[in-house]
Amino acid sequence: MNSDFPGTEQLVLCEDRDAGLRAVIAIDDTTLGPAVGGIRLKAYPSSGAAIEEARRLAAAMTLKNALAELPFGGGKAVILQDGPIRDRTTLMLAFGEFVARLGGTYVPGADMGTTVDDLAIVGQIAPDVACDEEDPAPWTSLGVWSGIRAAVAHVHGSATLAGTTVAIQGTGNVGADLARRVAADGGHVIVADIDEARAARVAAEVGGRVVAADAIASTPADVFAPCAAARVINEATLERLGSPIVAGAANDVLADTALADALHARGVLYVPDFLLNAGGVVHIHALRAGWSRDQLDAAVRRIGDRTAAILAAARSARGTPLAHATGRAQAVLATARSGQRDVAGTARV
Ligand code: NAI
């Protein structure tokens, strides 16, 4: 386990052999509320890799929710896809049983490999689920686009993405929508996906071009926007990055947080993933709080303002945006913890 990621509050290993389910639920922190975070469904090389991914992603959810000032803690689940799925409904119902045992401490949403329909099935058993009615991806992409605009403005002073080339890794729910927003803003789009047909469809739609999945990080562009797998910035990709700005939707982009310093030293502006990709959780909160569409839209666009403020603070302190964003999130958590201690103390008197 990477020592950058502190202890997980609760870690649950789940197995239902009849349903063909193996899963991990990581509840990182519930200081601010129930642990909200998506369910990732994919193949893992080992159980240990699945546990590490769940813990890292849950820790990022804690920071994301705190920074976005949402009343949510951080959690994440992964379902290990050991082979072809025999019966998806049975799998999701079995997973729902494990979520139900947690009594609402973990509120699952959609993530890579799971859909609104999957969450609706989990919600038949689990006491509380998110993303069972509406796909949050368009809101995630609106937040990412707002943050990319802020990053480009920070570096070049331009108000729109006109003339800016954005290389998007992954043309799934978020990446495809981001490609449309960049193109509508006057930007040029380059896409890549391991599903080449999907990448080609999105490129054709937005007048962009496709490159091979293993070439997107090194393709010359103004912005590299990872919108697919975790840990795509590592020692190897660092050496051949093609863009001076890294800003995307993918969770847990850095293989190690020390890479933020290495990027900074090379003059690459890395905008933290958990700062940019909060649109989906803001959407979850908006549905629960009964916000209007206008309120939701404004709250998601504020990710751009928050990005601008964090980039400016980091520049004046000569620090990394990651250190600043993490510091702000931790300050929110520390304030909430001290408030809880005060309340507990008062109650004892
Ligand atoms: P998705 O599952 O709809 O799309 C992911 C796409 O990436 C797929 O088309 C897949 O074929 C492609 N892909 C996977 N590995 C790849 C690789 N090595 N190279 C190129 N393409 C690859 O997922 P979605 O919802 O679009 O999410 C994308 C990323 O954004 C994920 O990391 C997710 O955790 C993150 N995110 C998504 C949110 C949402 O609202 N959907 C919210 C916050 C973060």
Image (cartoon, rainbow, N blue to C red):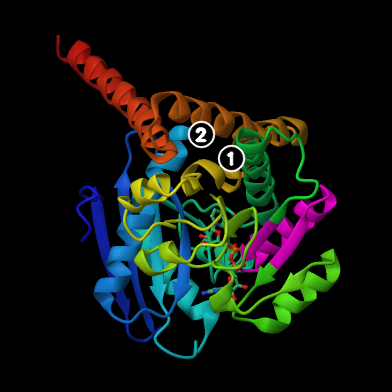
Residue 12 position, x and y percent, is 27, 62
On the rendered structure, is 278 left or right of 47? right
Magenta range is 166-190
On the rendered structure, is 199 left or right of 303? right
Instruction: Give the residue number, with chain letter if any, for mark 1.
Output: 282
Assign a secondary structure to mark 1: helix
**How far apart in space, not on screen, are marks 2 and 1 (Cα)?**
8 Å
View extreme (front): residue: 266
Quadrant of the drawing holding the N terminus:
bottom left
Q: Quadrant of ligand 1?
A: bottom right
* Residue 115 counted in the magenta span: no
Residue type (three-letter) at the residue carrying disc 2:
Ala
Residue 262 position, x and y percent, is 35, 51
Instruction: Give the residue number, with chain letter if any, for mark 2.
Output: 68
Q: Are marks 2 and 1 in contact (CB under 8 Å)?
A: yes
On the rendered structure, is 322 left or right of 297? left
* Residue 173 counted in the magenta span: yes
